Image (tube, coloured by chain):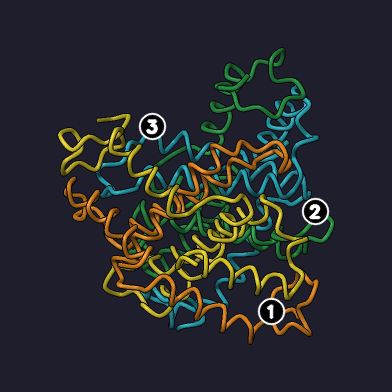
Chain colours: A yellow, B orange, C green, D cyan
Amino acid sequence: MGEIEEIISEILKFRNERDWEQYHTGKDLAICLSIESSELLESFLWKSDTEVDNEKLKDELADVLYSAFLLAAKYDLNIRKIILDKLEQNKGKYPISKSMGSNKKYDEL
Amino acid sequence: MGEIEEIISEILKFRNERDWEQYHTGKDLAICLSIESSELLESFLWKSDTEVDNEKLKDELADVLYSAFLLAAKYDLNIRKIILDKLEQNKGKYPISKSMGSNKKYDEL
Amino acid sequence: MGEIEEIISEILKFRNERDWEQYHTGKDLAICLSIESSELLESFLWKSDTEVDNEKLKDELADVLYSAFLLAAKYDLNIRKIILDKLEQNKGKYPISKSMGSNKKYDEL
Amino acid sequence: MGEIEEIISEILKFRNERDWEQYHTGKDLAICLSIESSELLESFLWKSDTEVDNEKLKDELADVLYSAFLLAAKYDLNIRKIILDKLEQNKGKYPISKSMGSNKKYDEL
């Protein structure tokens, strides 16, 4: 079993032992992911990077990843594949020659 | 090299070829993750789950994971370890006996 | 003094008495607004509308409005005017004949 | 009619002419508000405050306020009252003596 498959298997075991799948509509999982990302962002609010609490950050990133992996499992998406495919796609949207050192979005390049 | 380490290595290569690390403060990566999660959530807006466009969903989840993996790399966090640690921690917060079949938060159980 | 002007004046008084303007960059106010909106959304997570706690909702909406009004004040935007202008603009994007009873975005109509 | 009541009345007229109330569950309005706040936040991504496009910002803030006012209307909440009540409440959570010049959350003061 691959590393990611193993993590997802542990996540689904945790969910199933609590009979929570009934609440895990796609919409609610997406809401959950958005809320967890926002809690992570709160670590940085009113602060510079050096003031951030690394323990809180780790904690929140774990929640984000947990929600994202649950969504991947629900929609049967291969995490490794969709990230690597996206990188390929972004190589086209952000060619090195145009995007080097730039903070512009692809449609402004 | 593990599966996740390989993905991160590809992501960092993509970033470095464009000299983007200068923009990737922790705060901006957290903003980015929050925005991508919100775009994923938009797939579900005003809709029931059956009306969702799976291609759009896949695309947005890839963006979310890309941002989350970049954050993990920046803060040197081991993705597998922080998810599994969080599951252990949540087993304490959500004991099966109390949380079985319930949609309540741990502080309301 | 108009109703909205009065509210903003109270908000700025509260802020100034605490000398918080130094932290209120545009970016941090926008982060704050996004976090507050996400906390409001959490009232609905895993739930149907009938299960929502109205007191919590009221509380979170007040935080959202507080942040949004602070942003309007910072950028000297007239709240009444920008909402009414946006409605005019949306009448063009969503003509009644095309959008009546539809949950589609303007670019899908 | 008060200023805010007038704005809400225009918003509801716009909604009703399109027969959109059927889609405006509390949950979807809260999702909408969260997405609009996130789009506003995107104006600041990878940028310093001075690089922000003020026209885009105005546009996004109008969308945020539109969604927030729709929520207030749906739950019959008085915008002026809930903001002023929240300010009163926050005076207790953030007494001037403790919070002056501080970027800390009330539970860290």
Residue at 31% from the left image edge and 33% from the top image edge: A93
From the viewer's perspective, is residue D76 above or below residue D89?
Answer: above
Q: Amino acid at mark 2?
A: Asp
Residue at 46% from the left image edge and 65% from the top image edge: A2
Q: Nearer the viewer, residue C62 or A24?
A: A24
Crowding at dot 3, Cα within 10 Å, few <14 / some 14-19 / many 20+, comes out as: few
Q: Disc 3: which chain?
A: D
The picture places residue C78, in percent across and down from the top left corner, at 49, 37
As helix, strand or loop, the secondary structure at mark 3 comes to helix
Residue at 34% from the left image edge and 57% from the top image edge: B7
- Whole-Å distance between the Cαs marked 2 and 1? 20 Å
As helix, strand or loop, the secondary structure at mark 1 comes to helix
Residue at the limit of the structure toward the right, as seen here: C50
Q: Nearer the viewer, residue B91 or C35?
A: B91
Image check: B62 left or right of D50?
right
**Numbered disc total:** 3
Q: Amino acid at mark 3?
A: Glu
From the viewer's perspective, is residue A105 above or below residue D45?
Answer: above
Residue topped by disc 1: B106
Q: Disc 1: which chain?
A: B
Image check: C102 left or right of C8?
right
Crowding at dot 1, Cα within 10 Å, few <14 / some 14-19 / many 20+, comes out as: some
Residue A103 showing in the rendered view:
yes
Labels 1 and 3 positioned on one and the same chain: no
- Whole-Å distance between the Cαs marked 3 and 2? 35 Å
The picture places residue B9, in percent across and down from the top left corner, at 27, 59
Q: Which label sits in the foreground, 1 or 3?
A: 1
